[in-house]
Amino acid sequence: MDAPNTKGRKLRTHLAGIQTRLTVPGDKSISHRSIILGSIAEGQTRVTGFLKAEDCLATIAVMRQLGVEINEELESDEIVIEGRGWSGLTASKQPLDCGNSGTTMRLLTGLLAGQPFESQLIGDASLNQRPMGRVMEPLGAMGASLSGYLETELPPLVIQPVDKLTAIDYEMTVASAQVKSAIMLGALQAEGETTIIEKVLSRNHTEEMLRLFGVDVEVKRKAIRIRGGQKLTGQRVEVPGDISSAAYFLALGLLLPETEIKIENVGFNETRSGILDVIQAMGGDLKIEPRDNGISADLTVRSSPLKNTVIEGSIIPRLIDELPVIALMATQANGVTMIRDAEELKVKETDRIQAVASQLNAMGANIIPTEDGWLIRGQTDLQAADVNSFGDHRIGMMLQIAALLVKEGTVHLADASCVNISYPSFFDTIESLEKPSEGIK
Ligand code: SPQ
C-alpha cells in the first residue's frame, strides 16, 4: 500500500461576482461500473467520459490484476475493455489494492465471491475502517466464503472459492447502492433467482447498466429480481458529468453575490438528484435543462438568498455524498436547518458528521453535530482558519468552497491532495474562476 498523499494547500479566498460556464469530470459511480461490467462482459466495451481519478483508476488496476486487458485510446479519450466473460478472470498473485475506494472493494467482493480462485482485497487506512459486514452477510447467505481482518468485518478481506452460490431473498438493512450491487454481482453467479428488497431506494446505476449490458433485471417498486447464469455483452458507455462534483459549483453559484454558474452535461438521474430538490426547497435560483441524450442536463444557478429547510427520510440516499456541501449552504441560509437520518455519513472516508461540524465551526459556523446529522444555524460569517480534510475528498472540496466566501486572511487546508480521489482538476477549476466581462452567453 502506498503512503497516504497528504499535501496541504493555501486555499483561494474571497471571490465575488462571477459569470461562468464549466463542465465537471465523469460520474464516479458509472465509471467504476463501466470497468467492472465491461470486464465480465463478452466482447469489447468502449467508455467515453470516464473519470480518470484515483478511485476509478484503482478499479482499473484491480481488473488488470485479474487478467483483463484495459486500454486508454489517447486520441479518442476512450477506455477500451476487452471483456473476458464470467469465466475468463484469473487469480492475482498479489493482493488487490482498492486504495481509498469503498465502491471498488464492495462491488469486487460480490464479483469475486463467485469466482473459482482465492482473492485478497486490501485498501488504505481509511478503507480499513469501513464496514464490510454489510456485504459479507448477504453474500455469506448465498454460500460465499469471506473473512475480514482478524475475524472482524473490516478489511483486508479474503475471499475463498466455493462450489456454488445459491440465490437468496434479502431485505436490505442499510440504504446502500454498494451493498445492492455486490448482491447483484453475486446473484448473477448463483443458482436461481435472487430478490432484493430496498426499504429506501439507493442509486440505481448497477440495475440500469446491467440492463444496458443485456441482463434481465426486474425492478418493481422496491423489489429487484435477478436470475443467475445470465451473460453480459460488451457495450458503448457514455459517462455524463458527476452531479456530486457539480454540487460544489451549484453551492458556489448560489452563495456568492452577483454570480451565475452554468454546469453543462451533468448526470441527471432521479436516484441522485436530491440536491436539486433541496436547492429548490431553500429558494435557490436553479434552472434545469435536460439534454436530448436522456442521461444529463445543464444546470444553471444564480446568487440567491437561501432559507432553512429540513432534510430527512427517503431523500437522504439521493444526496448522501452532497451533504457536506449542503451543510455549508445551510450555514448561509436564513434560520436553522435540520438534517437527520444520515448516520451513514459516519462510515464514509472519514466521519463526515464530525468533520463538517468541527471544520466549519473552526471557520465561525454554528453547527451542532447529532447522531444522524446536524442542526445548522444560518447566516454565519465564515472566517479564515487552518482546516483539515482528514483525507476525505468531499470534506476538502467543501472547505475550498467555504474559503471562497471568506473575505480576509488565509485559509490553509491540510491533506488537500485527497481531491484527486474523485476530482483531480478541482483546484485548477477553482483557480480559473474569474469575473469575465461578458457573462454567460
Ligand atoms: O466509493 P466510496 O469511497 O464509498 O465513495 C463515496 C464518495 O463520497 O465518493 C462514499 F464515500 O460514494 C459512494 C456513495 O456514498 C459511492 C456509491 C456507489 O458508487 O455505489 C454509493 C454510495 O455509497 P453507499 O454505501 O451508500 O452505497
Image: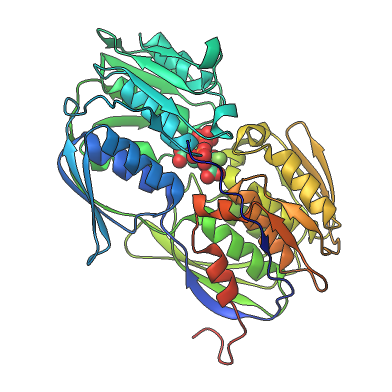
Residue 95 appears left or right of 46:
right
Residue 269 in sight from this viewpoint: no
**Vertical relation: 419 (above or below) 179:** below
Where does the image place residue 377, in percent across and percent down from the top left? 85, 52
Residue 195 in sight from this viewpoint: yes
Q: Kindly indicate the quadrant of the structure image that contains residue 117.
A: top left
Residue 245 appears left or right of 186:
right
Where does the image place residue 146, in percent across and percent down from the top left? 42, 14
Residue 8 appears left or right of 119:
right
**Vertical relation: 19 (above or below) 279:** below
Q: Residue at x 25, y 7 (%)?
A: 163
**Vertical relation: 259 (above or below) 201:** below
Q: Residue at x 56, y 54 (%)?
A: 419
Q: Kindly indicate the quadrant of the structure image that contains residue 258.
A: bottom right
Of all residues, the one furthest to the left in this rendering is: 43
Residue 74 appears left or right of 432:
left
Q: Residue at x 53, y 83 (%)?
A: 440
**Vertical relation: 328 (above or below) 70:** below
Of all residues, the one furthest to the front in this rendering is: 3
Indicate how the structure is coloured in the image: rainbow
